[in-house]
Image (cartoon, rainbow, N blue to C red):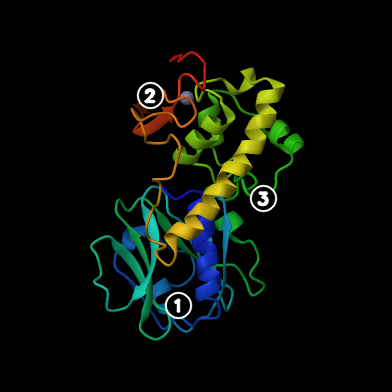
Amino acid sequence: MPEAPDLEVIKDYLNANLKRTRVESCKVLRPTVVRSLAPEVAKDLPGRTLLDAQRRGKFLTLRFSGGRSLVINPMLTGVLQHCQASVRVQKKTCVTMGVGGDMDLRYLDDRQMGKVYWIDNGEDGGDAQDGLVPQYMGLGPDVLSGITFEEFQTRLKKFNGEIKGVLTRGSFISGIGNAYSDEILFAAGISPFKKCRALKPDELQTLHTQCRRVLEEATETLRERMGGDIHKTVRDFLAVHNKGGQPCPKCGGNITQLTANQRITSYCRHCQPGLLIRN
Ligand SMILES: [Zn+2]
């Protein structure tokens, strides 16, 4: 599942390589992922120029000339691919765009749970996605946007429940998903099952610091590792997530891994103490 670090690298890649590129063609191969809120994207997009790519939380917005934007919510398995147009179109390819010469920008989605919104956000290119794209309006500040500790603390007071679940809620802070919440909590030495109201002041401080630090470091690692392969998900450098049974990088004990509601939680019982309480 793409989270803030993955999408940050993709955003920068698109801005470095495709800014001011004219889209020559557009084909929708899997219409179920597309929500056209402006005229049909396949007809309306060709001829427009990519102004820039922006990211907020786990949403990527490609802004085009003429006041239209493609807002992508990749959910679990959505990815963008920049490749030669001659590369074989896979079954999971949902949308293709011809972007200059013989290159394509494609949206691929294995499970097709992601959504692509083609919206009219006016000539000024404003933040119209707020009203048009579900879940966008309720998004909290982006995890890489430099949230102060005061704001972090104030926002957290509105939530209940286990800290891991709260971290992954876009309405608290946006951009953290299942994998990086495990990484942040490991770095902070906090059990994923600890109730967020039970966190002590020093734990809150550490958590605030690690949210940003872990995601910034991951972004830099991914920038080096992904290169132009923006469709590849690189996760092997993570410390604990999905590494159940392997040695903890801090204490050498075994990493514990649980699966609930099809979500993996990986943590170290020794470095992240706390009782596992299931209500
Ligand atoms: Zn450990």
Q: Nearer the viewer, residue 63 or 163?
A: 163
Q: Does label 3 or label 2 sit earlier along the sequence?
A: 3
Say which residue appears at 30% left-offset and 64% top-offset: 93
Element on which disc 1 rests: helix
Closest to the camera, between mark 3 and mark 2, is: 2
212 left or right, relative to 263: right
Report x, y in % for residue 51. Answer: 58, 75
Closest to the camera, between mark 2 and mark 1, is: 2
Separation of disc 3 and disc 2 at Cα?
Answer: 34 Å
User: Which amino acid, mark 2?
Assistant: Asn
Mark yes or no: residue 72 visible.
no
Q: Are marks 2 and 1 in contact (CB under 8 Å)?
A: no
Q: Does label 1 or label 3 sit earlier along the sequence?
A: 1
Report x, y in % for residue 225. Answer: 44, 58
| Residue that carries the numbered disc 2 in the rendered image | 254
Separation of disc 1 and disc 3 at Cα?
Answer: 33 Å
Separation of disc 2 and disc 1 at Cα?
Answer: 54 Å
Say which residue appears at 23% left-offset and 62% top-offset: 91
**Residue sitting at the far right:** 150
Q: Is mark 1 within 8 Å of ligand 1?
A: no
Residue 44 circle label: 1
| Residue that carries the numbered disc 3 in the rendered image | 145
Mark yes or no: residue 108 visible.
yes
Report x, y in % for residue 206. Answer: 66, 31
